[in-house]
Amino acid sequence: MTLRTDVELTPAATAEVQALASALRALHGRLLAETQVGFEKVYGRVEGAGALLQLAIHDPFFAWLRPLAQKMTELDELEVVTGAALAEIKAGIARLLDEPSDFRTTYLEVLQTAPGVVLAHAALRKTVRLPPRIGAAA
């Protein structure tokens, strides 16, 4: 993420943006690793980071992760970080995690089996300041 130098951010705002970006990357990384394990059980070993990147971009097996990758991109592409822009990205993350969707269906399944994902999930919710909310009825 590049922060414009002509827009002065408070140290707290800069730290908040960096913490959010870090939490998103950590969760995405854990989810990508778990999805890779599932993919390899069905299709065999993924040969290297380049092959994994291509799968993440193009393969339907990884398609469920793309909405989260989109949120990371939205944060990275902010030219001017304002409170309103950051609030909108946080609201989008909350919707992604909490509202019914293909992403959330698979996400809840992965949360049941991957402790590392649970920890990354909790860290993201804390960074976004969302209360814990997991489950089919949520």
Image: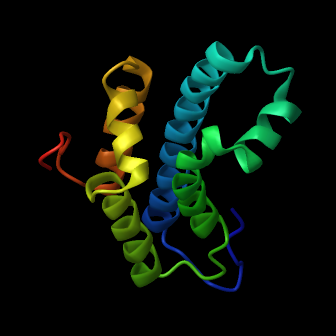
Q: Quadrant of residue 33?
A: top right
Q: Is residue 28 left or right of residue 50?
A: left
Quadrant of the rendering where the N terminus is positioned: bottom right
Write the residue at 18% across / 45% down: 133
Extreme residue in the front direction: 42
Write the residue at 53% across / 62% down: 71
Q: Is residue 61 above or below residue 16?
A: above
Q: Position of residue 118 (x, y in %)?
A: 34, 28
Q: Quadrant of residue 130?
A: bottom left
Write the residue at 27% across / 59% down: 99
Write the residue at 40% across / 83% down: 84
Q: Position of residue 119 (x, y in %)?
A: 36, 27
Q: Position of residue 74 (x, y in %)?
A: 59, 69
Q: Nearer the viewer, residue 23 or 95?
A: 95
Q: Nearer the viewer, residue 113 or 88?
A: 113
Q: Is residue 112 above or below residue 80?
A: above
Q: Quadrant of residue 60?
A: top right
Q: How many marks?
A: 0
Q: Position of residue 73 (x, y in %)?
A: 64, 63
